Amino acid sequence: MATAPLKFNTYDPTIEAALLKIERLLSKEYHLSKRAIALLLLQGDEEIEKIVADRDRQNFKEIQQIVTTTQANYKEPLHFVLSLQRQNIATQLSQQVIMGQPESKISLSERISRLTIQPITGIPILLLVLYYGLYQFVGVFGAGTIVDYLETNLFENIINPWINKIVESYIPWVAIQELLAKDYGILTLALRYAIAIVLPIVGTFFIVFSIIEDTGYLPRLSLLVDRLFKGIGLNGRAVIPMTLGFGCGTMATMVTRTLETTRERVIATLLLALAVPCSAQLGVIMAVLAGRPGAIAVWSGFILLIFLLIGWLTAKLLPGERPTFYMELPPLRWPNWRNVLTKTYTRMQWYLLEVLPLFILASVLIWAGNITGIFQQLIAWLAPMVNWLGLPDETAQIFLFGFFRRDYGAAGLFDLYQTGGLTGTQLVVTAATLTLFVPCIAQFIMMIKERGFKTAVAIAAFIFPFAFLAGFVLNWLINLTGLKL
Protein backbone atom coordinates (compact mmCIF):
# COMPACT_ATOMS: atom_id res chain seq x y z
CA MET A 1 0.00 0.00 0.00
CA ALA A 2 1.41 3.36 -1.01
CA THR A 3 2.04 5.85 1.80
CA ALA A 4 1.50 9.58 1.49
CA PRO A 5 4.66 11.71 1.79
CA LEU A 6 5.01 13.57 5.07
CA LYS A 7 4.37 17.30 4.87
CA PHE A 8 5.48 19.93 7.32
CA ASN A 9 6.29 23.61 7.40
CA THR A 10 9.81 24.94 7.79
CA TYR A 11 10.76 28.00 9.83
CA ASP A 12 8.74 31.20 9.38
CA PRO A 13 9.45 33.42 6.30
CA THR A 14 11.66 35.88 8.25
CA ILE A 15 13.92 33.09 9.54
CA GLU A 16 14.00 31.32 6.16
CA ALA A 17 14.94 34.57 4.39
CA ALA A 18 17.77 35.18 6.86
CA LEU A 19 19.02 31.60 6.48
CA LEU A 20 19.08 31.96 2.69
CA LYS A 21 21.06 35.23 2.86
CA ILE A 22 23.61 33.77 5.29
CA GLU A 23 24.02 30.58 3.20
CA ARG A 24 24.88 32.70 0.14
CA LEU A 25 27.57 34.54 2.11
CA LEU A 26 29.24 31.31 3.31
CA SER A 27 31.85 30.79 0.59
CA LYS A 28 34.21 28.34 2.33
CA GLU A 29 33.92 24.64 3.12
CA TYR A 30 32.61 23.46 6.51
CA HIS A 31 32.04 20.00 7.94
CA LEU A 32 28.35 20.84 8.36
CA SER A 33 25.91 21.97 5.66
CA LYS A 34 25.65 25.72 5.04
CA ARG A 35 22.06 25.69 6.35
CA ALA A 36 23.22 24.10 9.62
CA ILE A 37 26.00 26.71 9.94
CA ALA A 38 23.49 29.50 9.23
CA LEU A 39 21.11 28.12 11.90
CA LEU A 40 23.91 28.00 14.49
CA LEU A 41 24.90 31.56 13.64
CA LEU A 42 21.33 32.75 14.16
CA GLN A 43 21.30 30.97 17.54
CA GLY A 44 24.46 32.81 18.62
CA ASP A 45 26.78 29.78 18.81
CA GLU A 46 30.11 31.35 19.84
CA GLU A 47 32.27 28.48 18.53
CA ILE A 48 30.72 28.64 15.04
CA GLU A 49 31.01 32.44 15.06
CA LYS A 50 34.77 32.13 15.62
CA ILE A 51 35.15 29.59 12.81
CA VAL A 52 33.10 31.63 10.32
CA ALA A 53 34.87 34.86 11.33
CA ASP A 54 38.16 33.12 10.53
CA ARG A 55 37.20 31.43 7.25
CA ASP A 56 34.71 33.93 5.77
CA ARG A 57 36.35 37.02 7.15
CA GLN A 58 35.25 39.30 4.26
CA ASN A 59 31.54 38.45 4.71
CA PHE A 60 31.38 38.09 8.49
CA LYS A 61 30.28 41.67 9.23
CA GLU A 62 27.42 41.33 6.76
CA ILE A 63 26.40 38.02 8.37
CA GLN A 64 26.39 39.67 11.82
CA GLN A 65 24.19 42.44 10.42
CA ILE A 66 21.69 39.86 9.11
CA VAL A 67 21.57 38.19 12.56
CA THR A 68 21.00 41.56 14.27
CA THR A 69 18.29 42.58 11.81
CA THR A 70 16.53 39.23 12.20
CA GLN A 71 16.64 39.44 16.01
CA ALA A 72 14.93 42.86 15.83
CA ASN A 73 11.77 41.11 14.54
CA TYR A 74 11.31 39.08 17.75
CA LYS A 75 10.88 39.85 21.44
CA GLU A 76 12.49 36.53 22.50
CA PRO A 77 16.12 35.53 21.81
CA LEU A 78 16.57 33.86 18.42
CA HIS A 79 17.77 30.57 19.94
CA PHE A 80 14.50 30.40 21.87
CA VAL A 81 12.40 31.29 18.78
CA LEU A 82 14.13 28.61 16.71
CA SER A 83 13.68 26.00 19.44
CA LEU A 84 9.96 26.70 19.64
CA GLN A 85 9.56 26.56 15.86
CA ARG A 86 11.48 23.27 15.76
CA GLN A 87 9.20 21.92 18.46
CA ASN A 88 6.18 22.89 16.35
CA ILE A 89 7.68 21.11 13.34
CA ALA A 90 8.23 17.98 15.45
CA THR A 91 4.62 18.19 16.67
CA GLN A 92 3.36 18.44 13.09
CA LEU A 93 5.38 15.38 12.09
CA SER A 94 4.20 13.33 15.06
CA GLN A 95 0.57 14.24 14.34
CA GLN A 96 0.93 12.81 10.83
CA VAL A 97 2.29 9.44 11.96
CA ILE A 98 0.57 8.87 15.34
CA MET A 99 -3.09 7.86 15.50
CA GLY A 100 -5.04 8.93 18.55
CA GLN A 101 -8.00 10.80 19.90
CA PRO A 102 -7.75 14.40 18.69
CA GLU A 103 -7.51 16.94 21.47
CA SER A 104 -10.04 19.73 21.24
CA LYS A 105 -7.82 22.20 23.13
CA ILE A 106 -4.49 22.58 24.91
CA SER A 107 -4.62 21.06 28.38
CA LEU A 108 -4.17 23.16 31.52
CA SER A 109 -0.89 21.44 32.41
CA GLU A 110 0.50 22.19 28.94
CA ARG A 111 -0.49 25.87 29.32
CA ILE A 112 1.27 26.07 32.71
CA SER A 113 4.26 24.19 31.28
CA ARG A 114 4.63 26.79 28.52
CA LEU A 115 4.37 29.63 31.05
CA THR A 116 7.24 28.17 33.13
CA ILE A 117 9.72 28.17 30.21
CA GLN A 118 8.89 31.63 28.80
CA PRO A 119 11.25 34.23 30.37
CA ILE A 120 8.50 36.85 30.82
CA THR A 121 6.29 34.51 32.85
CA GLY A 122 8.88 31.92 33.92
CA ILE A 123 11.03 34.31 35.99
CA PRO A 124 8.10 35.60 38.12
CA ILE A 125 7.01 31.97 38.64
CA LEU A 126 10.56 31.10 39.75
CA LEU A 127 10.60 34.04 42.18
CA LEU A 128 7.26 32.89 43.64
CA VAL A 129 8.65 29.36 44.09
CA LEU A 130 11.75 30.76 45.84
CA TYR A 131 9.73 33.12 48.06
CA TYR A 132 7.11 30.65 49.26
CA GLY A 133 9.25 27.51 49.05
CA LEU A 134 12.58 28.70 50.44
CA TYR A 135 11.90 31.91 52.35
CA GLN A 136 8.48 31.28 53.89
CA PHE A 137 8.48 27.50 54.35
CA VAL A 138 12.19 26.73 54.96
CA GLY A 139 13.38 30.08 56.34
CA VAL A 140 10.42 31.32 58.36
CA PHE A 141 8.63 28.07 59.27
CA GLY A 142 11.51 25.53 59.37
CA ALA A 143 14.38 27.72 60.61
CA GLY A 144 12.10 30.02 62.60
CA THR A 145 9.08 28.35 64.17
CA ILE A 146 10.31 24.75 64.47
CA VAL A 147 13.91 25.61 65.39
CA ASP A 148 12.76 28.15 67.99
CA TYR A 149 10.55 25.53 69.64
CA LEU A 150 13.17 22.75 69.65
CA GLU A 151 16.12 25.00 70.49
CA THR A 152 14.57 27.14 73.21
CA ASN A 153 11.69 25.17 74.69
CA LEU A 154 13.13 21.69 74.43
CA PHE A 155 16.93 21.80 74.53
CA GLU A 156 17.75 25.03 76.41
CA ASN A 157 14.97 24.75 79.01
CA ILE A 158 14.67 20.98 79.48
CA ILE A 159 17.18 18.63 77.85
CA ASN A 160 20.50 20.48 78.29
CA PRO A 161 19.93 21.41 82.00
CA TRP A 162 18.87 17.81 82.68
CA ILE A 163 21.97 16.40 80.92
CA ASN A 164 24.28 18.83 82.76
CA LYS A 165 22.74 17.85 86.09
CA ILE A 166 23.01 14.08 85.41
CA VAL A 167 26.61 14.35 84.18
CA GLU A 168 27.71 16.48 87.15
CA SER A 169 26.01 14.08 89.57
CA TYR A 170 27.44 10.81 88.27
CA ILE A 171 30.77 11.75 86.61
CA PRO A 172 33.37 13.25 88.95
CA TRP A 173 35.99 14.14 86.31
CA VAL A 174 35.59 17.68 84.96
CA ALA A 175 37.25 16.86 81.61
CA ILE A 176 34.76 14.04 80.91
CA GLN A 177 31.89 16.27 82.06
CA GLU A 178 32.94 18.86 79.45
CA LEU A 179 33.27 16.16 76.76
CA LEU A 180 29.65 15.05 77.27
CA ALA A 181 27.89 18.22 78.48
CA LYS A 182 28.23 21.98 79.14
CA ASP A 183 29.32 24.43 76.40
CA TYR A 184 30.98 22.11 73.84
CA GLY A 185 29.71 18.67 74.93
CA ILE A 186 28.67 15.94 72.53
CA LEU A 187 25.18 15.74 74.06
CA THR A 188 24.60 19.45 74.62
CA LEU A 189 26.26 20.95 71.51
CA ALA A 190 26.60 18.33 68.75
CA LEU A 191 23.15 16.79 69.31
CA ARG A 192 21.54 20.20 69.78
CA TYR A 193 23.03 21.51 66.51
CA ALA A 194 22.14 18.33 64.59
CA ILE A 195 18.59 17.81 65.90
CA ALA A 196 17.32 21.22 67.05
CA ILE A 197 18.88 23.43 64.35
CA VAL A 198 19.94 21.42 61.29
CA LEU A 199 17.30 18.68 61.11
CA PRO A 200 14.18 20.95 60.92
CA ILE A 201 15.84 23.08 58.26
CA VAL A 202 17.00 20.27 55.97
CA GLY A 203 13.68 18.47 56.57
CA THR A 204 11.56 21.41 55.35
CA PHE A 205 13.97 22.01 52.47
CA PHE A 206 13.81 18.39 51.33
CA ILE A 207 9.99 18.52 51.38
CA VAL A 208 10.02 21.55 49.07
CA PHE A 209 12.69 20.05 46.83
CA SER A 210 10.85 16.73 46.53
CA ILE A 211 7.62 18.54 45.55
CA ILE A 212 9.46 20.58 42.88
CA GLU A 213 11.20 17.46 41.61
CA ASP A 214 8.04 15.34 41.45
CA THR A 215 6.03 17.95 39.52
CA GLY A 216 8.52 17.97 36.63
CA TYR A 217 9.39 21.64 37.19
CA LEU A 218 13.18 21.12 37.31
CA PRO A 219 13.62 20.32 33.56
CA ARG A 220 11.57 23.42 32.73
CA LEU A 221 13.80 25.47 35.01
CA SER A 222 16.75 24.07 33.03
CA LEU A 223 15.27 25.45 29.81
CA LEU A 224 14.56 28.80 31.46
CA VAL A 225 18.12 29.38 32.68
CA ASP A 226 19.98 27.73 29.80
CA ARG A 227 21.09 30.98 28.16
CA LEU A 228 22.21 32.49 31.51
CA PHE A 229 24.18 29.35 32.38
CA LYS A 230 25.90 29.33 28.98
CA GLY A 231 27.45 32.67 29.99
CA ILE A 232 29.22 30.91 32.86
CA GLY A 233 30.40 27.93 30.82
CA LEU A 234 27.50 25.61 31.73
CA ASN A 235 24.15 24.77 30.17
CA GLY A 236 20.61 24.36 31.48
CA ARG A 237 21.29 20.77 32.56
CA ALA A 238 23.58 22.15 35.31
CA VAL A 239 20.54 23.57 37.11
CA ILE A 240 19.96 20.08 38.58
CA PRO A 241 23.27 19.78 40.53
CA MET A 242 23.07 23.50 41.36
CA THR A 243 19.58 23.08 42.82
CA LEU A 244 20.65 19.91 44.63
CA GLY A 245 23.49 21.98 46.10
CA PHE A 246 20.91 23.96 48.04
CA GLY A 247 20.13 20.67 49.77
CA CYS A 248 23.61 19.19 50.20
CA GLY A 249 26.83 20.19 48.41
CA THR A 250 28.27 16.68 48.79
CA MET A 251 25.37 15.07 46.94
CA ALA A 252 25.38 17.85 44.30
CA THR A 253 29.13 17.45 43.66
CA MET A 254 28.56 13.78 42.95
CA VAL A 255 25.72 14.65 40.51
CA THR A 256 28.05 16.92 38.45
CA ARG A 257 29.22 13.71 36.77
CA THR A 258 26.00 13.90 34.70
CA LEU A 259 27.38 16.98 32.90
CA GLU A 260 28.82 16.25 29.48
CA THR A 261 32.33 17.74 29.52
CA THR A 262 35.19 17.87 32.06
CA ARG A 263 35.21 21.65 31.73
CA GLU A 264 31.55 21.87 32.82
CA ARG A 265 32.16 19.49 35.73
CA VAL A 266 35.09 21.56 37.05
CA ILE A 267 33.15 24.84 36.75
CA ALA A 268 30.08 23.35 38.47
CA THR A 269 32.23 21.86 41.27
CA LEU A 270 33.92 25.22 41.89
CA LEU A 271 30.63 27.14 41.98
CA LEU A 272 29.02 24.57 44.29
CA ALA A 273 31.95 24.79 46.71
CA LEU A 274 32.07 28.59 46.57
CA ALA A 275 28.66 30.18 46.20
CA VAL A 276 25.88 27.64 46.71
CA PRO A 277 24.87 27.38 50.41
CA CYS A 278 23.55 24.03 51.65
CA SER A 279 20.02 23.73 53.06
CA ALA A 280 21.06 24.03 56.72
CA GLN A 281 23.27 27.02 56.03
CA LEU A 282 20.63 28.66 53.84
CA GLY A 283 17.88 28.10 56.41
CA VAL A 284 19.96 29.55 59.26
CA ILE A 285 20.90 32.57 57.16
CA MET A 286 17.23 33.10 56.23
CA ALA A 287 16.36 32.88 59.94
CA VAL A 288 18.99 35.37 61.18
CA LEU A 289 18.25 37.83 58.34
CA ALA A 290 14.45 37.47 58.57
CA GLY A 291 12.79 40.81 59.28
CA ARG A 292 15.63 42.64 57.51
CA PRO A 293 14.58 42.79 53.81
CA GLY A 294 17.54 45.03 52.97
CA ALA A 295 19.99 42.58 54.54
CA ILE A 296 18.51 39.64 52.61
CA ALA A 297 18.66 41.67 49.37
CA VAL A 298 22.34 42.62 49.93
CA TRP A 299 23.35 39.06 50.91
CA SER A 300 21.53 37.35 48.03
CA GLY A 301 22.60 40.00 45.48
CA PHE A 302 26.24 39.76 46.57
CA ILE A 303 26.31 35.93 46.45
CA LEU A 304 24.60 35.94 43.03
CA LEU A 305 27.13 38.48 41.76
CA ILE A 306 30.04 36.32 43.00
CA PHE A 307 28.43 33.23 41.43
CA LEU A 308 28.09 34.90 38.03
CA LEU A 309 31.45 36.71 38.15
CA ILE A 310 33.53 33.66 39.12
CA GLY A 311 31.56 31.48 36.69
CA TRP A 312 32.13 33.94 33.84
CA LEU A 313 35.85 34.34 34.62
CA THR A 314 36.31 30.56 34.91
CA ALA A 315 34.51 30.02 31.60
CA LYS A 316 36.83 32.55 29.96
CA LEU A 317 40.04 31.12 31.45
CA LEU A 318 39.34 27.39 31.43
CA PRO A 319 40.01 25.71 28.06
CA GLY A 320 37.72 22.99 26.77
CA GLU A 321 34.64 22.16 24.78
CA ARG A 322 31.68 24.55 24.85
CA PRO A 323 28.44 23.12 26.31
CA THR A 324 25.45 21.96 24.28
CA PHE A 325 22.00 21.28 25.68
CA TYR A 326 19.26 18.81 24.84
CA MET A 327 16.66 17.66 27.37
CA GLU A 328 13.36 15.83 27.19
CA LEU A 329 10.51 17.49 29.06
CA PRO A 330 8.39 15.11 31.16
CA PRO A 331 4.70 15.97 31.66
CA LEU A 332 3.93 18.61 34.29
CA ARG A 333 1.78 17.03 37.00
CA TRP A 334 0.54 17.28 40.57
CA PRO A 335 3.09 15.80 42.98
CA ASN A 336 2.52 12.28 44.21
CA TRP A 337 2.61 12.66 48.00
CA ARG A 338 3.83 9.13 48.54
CA ASN A 339 6.83 9.87 46.30
CA VAL A 340 7.42 13.19 48.10
CA LEU A 341 7.37 11.61 51.56
CA THR A 342 9.57 8.68 50.50
CA LYS A 343 12.19 10.96 48.91
CA THR A 344 12.13 13.33 51.88
CA TYR A 345 12.52 10.50 54.40
CA THR A 346 15.38 8.90 52.43
CA ARG A 347 17.27 12.18 52.11
CA MET A 348 16.79 13.13 55.76
CA GLN A 349 17.98 9.70 56.85
CA TRP A 350 21.03 9.93 54.56
CA TYR A 351 21.81 13.46 55.72
CA LEU A 352 21.46 12.68 59.42
CA LEU A 353 23.63 9.58 59.16
CA GLU A 354 26.29 11.68 57.45
CA VAL A 355 26.08 14.80 59.59
CA LEU A 356 25.73 13.35 63.09
CA PRO A 357 29.13 11.56 63.24
CA LEU A 358 30.84 14.68 61.86
CA PHE A 359 29.12 16.93 64.42
CA ILE A 360 30.21 14.55 67.20
CA LEU A 361 33.76 14.51 65.79
CA ALA A 362 33.77 18.31 65.67
CA SER A 363 32.63 18.48 69.30
CA VAL A 364 35.37 16.06 70.34
CA LEU A 365 38.03 18.06 68.47
CA ILE A 366 36.77 21.31 69.99
CA TRP A 367 36.74 19.70 73.45
CA ALA A 368 40.31 18.43 72.93
CA GLY A 369 41.39 21.83 71.64
CA ASN A 370 39.64 23.53 74.55
CA ILE A 371 41.31 21.53 77.33
CA THR A 372 44.75 21.74 75.65
CA GLY A 373 44.46 25.46 74.88
CA ILE A 374 44.78 24.92 71.08
CA PHE A 375 41.19 25.98 70.47
CA GLN A 376 41.73 29.32 72.23
CA GLN A 377 45.02 29.82 70.34
CA LEU A 378 43.33 29.19 66.98
CA ILE A 379 40.59 31.67 67.88
CA ALA A 380 43.27 34.20 68.84
CA TRP A 381 44.94 33.73 65.43
CA LEU A 382 41.63 34.07 63.61
CA ALA A 383 40.53 37.15 65.57
CA PRO A 384 42.63 39.70 63.57
CA MET A 385 41.25 38.23 60.33
CA VAL A 386 37.62 38.62 61.41
CA ASN A 387 38.42 42.10 62.81
CA TRP A 388 39.70 42.94 59.30
CA LEU A 389 36.15 42.21 58.09
CA GLY A 390 34.71 44.57 60.69
CA LEU A 391 33.52 41.69 62.90
CA PRO A 392 33.94 41.16 66.67
CA ASP A 393 36.31 38.54 68.16
CA GLU A 394 33.37 36.24 68.96
CA THR A 395 32.86 35.47 65.25
CA ALA A 396 36.30 33.80 65.10
CA GLN A 397 34.73 30.81 66.87
CA ILE A 398 32.01 30.65 64.17
CA PHE A 399 34.60 30.50 61.39
CA LEU A 400 36.53 27.86 63.30
CA PHE A 401 33.32 25.82 63.47
CA GLY A 402 32.94 26.41 59.74
CA PHE A 403 36.19 24.53 59.09
CA PHE A 404 34.41 21.35 60.20
CA ARG A 405 31.17 22.00 58.34
CA ARG A 406 29.60 25.11 56.86
CA ASP A 407 26.30 24.31 58.58
CA TYR A 408 28.13 23.81 61.87
CA GLY A 409 29.45 27.36 61.49
CA ALA A 410 25.99 28.58 60.50
CA ALA A 411 24.53 27.01 63.63
CA GLY A 412 27.17 28.93 65.64
CA LEU A 413 26.06 32.11 63.85
CA PHE A 414 22.49 31.37 64.93
CA ASP A 415 23.64 31.07 68.54
CA LEU A 416 25.51 34.40 68.41
CA TYR A 417 22.57 36.08 66.65
CA GLN A 418 20.22 35.05 69.46
CA THR A 419 22.44 36.82 72.00
CA GLY A 420 22.24 40.06 69.96
CA GLY A 421 26.02 40.11 69.48
CA LEU A 422 26.02 41.38 65.86
CA THR A 423 24.77 44.50 64.07
CA GLY A 424 22.87 44.27 60.78
CA THR A 425 26.00 44.95 58.73
CA GLN A 426 28.01 42.40 60.69
CA LEU A 427 25.27 39.79 60.22
CA VAL A 428 25.34 40.28 56.44
CA VAL A 429 29.17 40.23 56.23
CA THR A 430 29.39 37.11 58.42
CA ALA A 431 26.63 35.34 56.47
CA ALA A 432 28.23 36.21 53.11
CA THR A 433 31.75 35.15 54.18
CA LEU A 434 30.45 31.89 55.68
CA THR A 435 28.51 31.19 52.46
CA LEU A 436 31.70 31.58 50.42
CA PHE A 437 33.79 29.71 52.98
CA VAL A 438 35.72 26.48 52.34
CA PRO A 439 33.56 23.42 51.57
CA CYS A 440 32.82 21.05 54.43
CA ILE A 441 34.91 17.91 54.98
CA ALA A 442 32.40 15.59 53.28
CA GLN A 443 32.09 17.85 50.21
CA PHE A 444 35.88 18.20 49.99
CA ILE A 445 36.29 14.41 50.04
CA MET A 446 33.69 14.11 47.28
CA MET A 447 35.55 16.78 45.27
CA ILE A 448 38.73 14.70 45.50
CA LYS A 449 36.83 11.59 44.42
CA GLU A 450 35.10 13.27 41.46
CA ARG A 451 37.67 15.83 40.22
CA GLY A 452 40.97 14.48 41.56
CA PHE A 453 43.27 15.59 44.40
CA LYS A 454 45.03 18.48 42.57
CA THR A 455 41.80 20.08 41.33
CA ALA A 456 40.09 19.75 44.73
CA VAL A 457 43.05 21.27 46.59
CA ALA A 458 43.35 24.07 44.01
CA ILE A 459 39.65 24.92 44.43
CA ALA A 460 39.90 24.94 48.26
CA ALA A 461 43.13 27.00 48.14
CA PHE A 462 41.38 29.59 45.99
CA ILE A 463 38.18 29.73 48.06
CA PHE A 464 39.68 30.34 51.53
CA PRO A 465 41.45 33.69 50.87
CA PHE A 466 38.79 34.71 48.35
CA ALA A 467 36.01 34.35 50.96
CA PHE A 468 37.80 36.69 53.39
CA LEU A 469 38.67 39.15 50.60
CA ALA A 470 35.04 39.18 49.42
CA GLY A 471 33.84 39.71 53.02
CA PHE A 472 36.22 42.65 53.39
CA VAL A 473 35.02 44.22 50.12
CA LEU A 474 31.37 43.77 51.12
CA ASN A 475 31.94 45.40 54.53
CA TRP A 476 33.81 48.27 52.86
CA LEU A 477 31.03 48.80 50.29
CA ILE A 478 28.28 48.80 52.93
CA ASN A 479 30.16 51.35 55.05
CA LEU A 480 31.03 53.45 51.99
CA THR A 481 27.41 53.67 50.84
CA GLY A 482 26.06 54.13 54.38
CA LEU A 483 23.48 51.36 54.01
CA LYS A 484 21.44 50.71 57.15
CA LEU A 485 20.73 46.97 57.40
Image (spheres, rainbow, N blue to C red):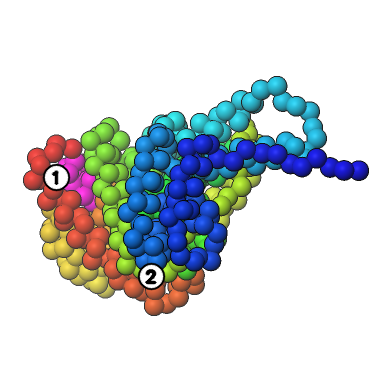
Q: Is residue 460 above or below residue 415?
A: below
Q: Is residue 393 left or right of residue 84?
A: left
Residue at 77 percent across and 42 percent down: it is 5
Q: Is residue 379 left or right of residue 288?
A: left
Please tell me the numbered disc located at residue 478. 1
Q: Quadrant of the C terminus?
A: top left
Residue at the spot of label 2: 319
Q: Is residue 422 above or below residue 389?
A: above
Neighbourhood count class around disc 2 (C-alpha, 10 Å): few under 14, some 14–19, many 20 upward: few
Q: Where is residue 275, by image quadrant? A: bottom left
Q: Is residue 444 above or below residue 285?
A: below
Q: Earlier in the sequence, mark 1 or mark 2?
A: 2
Callout 1: helix, strand or loop? helix
Neighbourhood count class around disc 1 (C-alpha, 10 Å): few under 14, some 14–19, many 20 upward: some
- The question of residue 427 being in magenta is answered with yes
Task: Give the residue at the far right of this rendering.
Answer: 1
Q: Which residues are magenta?
A: 420-430
Q: Is residue 13 left or right of residue 393?
A: right
Q: Amino acid at mark 2?
A: Pro
Residue at 36 percent across and 57 percent down: it is 59
Task: Give the residue at the far bottom of this rendering.
Answer: 454
